[in-house]
Image (cartoon, rainbow, N blue to C red):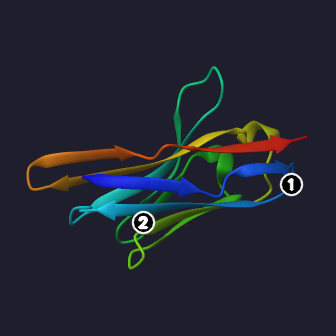
Amino acid sequence: QVQLVESGGGLVQAGGSLRLSCVASGILGSSWTMGWYRQAPGKQRELVASITKIGYSNYTDSVKGRFTISRDNAKGTMYLQMNSLRPEDTAVYYCNLKSWLAATRIDSWGQGTQVTVSS
């Protein structure tokens, strides 16, 4: 079983920065992908950025050039550095891990952390 714990959310003015962290514990599997998703009120949850165990990353168009995803495998931690924040980035941000352990698919979620960007 995998546990994910996010931290780092908060209230920031437009143009400001925040860094989110996600600590993973448990058996992650040999090849995993971790990602940050967000869900704003009344909207569907969307993928913001993802990163594989070997470091390949992917971003949704609206955050390219502003957000940076990274991971520290030794610490079991994933980060999301968010710069030039906009009011439309306001959402609950969730950490996710997808992996395989033997023949079992792992799809774990954190509890979420609120990010609020004021104009």
Q: Farthest residue in the bottom direction? A: 74
Q: Nearer the viewer, residue 48 or 13?
A: 13
Looking at the rendered structure, the secondary structure element under dot 1 is: loop
Number of disc labels? 2
Neighbour tally class for label 2: few under 14, some 14-19, many 20 plus, Cα within 10 Å: few
Classify residue 82 by image quadrant: bottom right
Q: Position of residue 108 (x, y in %)?
A: 34, 46
Is residue 82 shown to the viewer in this render? Answer: no
Q: Which residue type carries mark 2?
A: Tyr
Q: Where is residue 56 in the image (x, y as percent from the top left)?
A: 42, 65
> Of the numbered discs in the image, which one, if any, rests on residue 56?
2
Which image quarter is the C terminus in? top right
Marks 1 and 2 close (CB-CB < 8 Å): no
Q: Nearer the viewer, residue 30 or 61?
A: 30
Which residue lies at the image location 72% right of the left edge and 39% below the top edge? 90
Q: Where is residue 63 in the image (x, y as percent from the top left)?
A: 66, 50
Q: Farthest residue in the top direction? A: 42
Q: Is residue 110 left or right of residue 89?
A: left
Q: Which of marks 1 and 2 is nearer the N terminus?
A: 1
Looking at the rendered structure, the secondary structure element under dot 2 is: loop
Q: In whole angstroms, how far apart are the C-alphas of marks 1 and 2? A: 27 Å
Neighbour tally class for label 1: few under 14, some 14-19, many 20 plus, Cα within 10 Å: some
What residue is pinned by disc 1? 15
Q: Position of residue 33 (x, y in %)?
A: 35, 57
Is residue 29 shown to the viewer in this render? Answer: yes
Front label number (1 vs 2) = 1
> Of the numbered discs in the image, which one, if any, rests on residue 113?
none
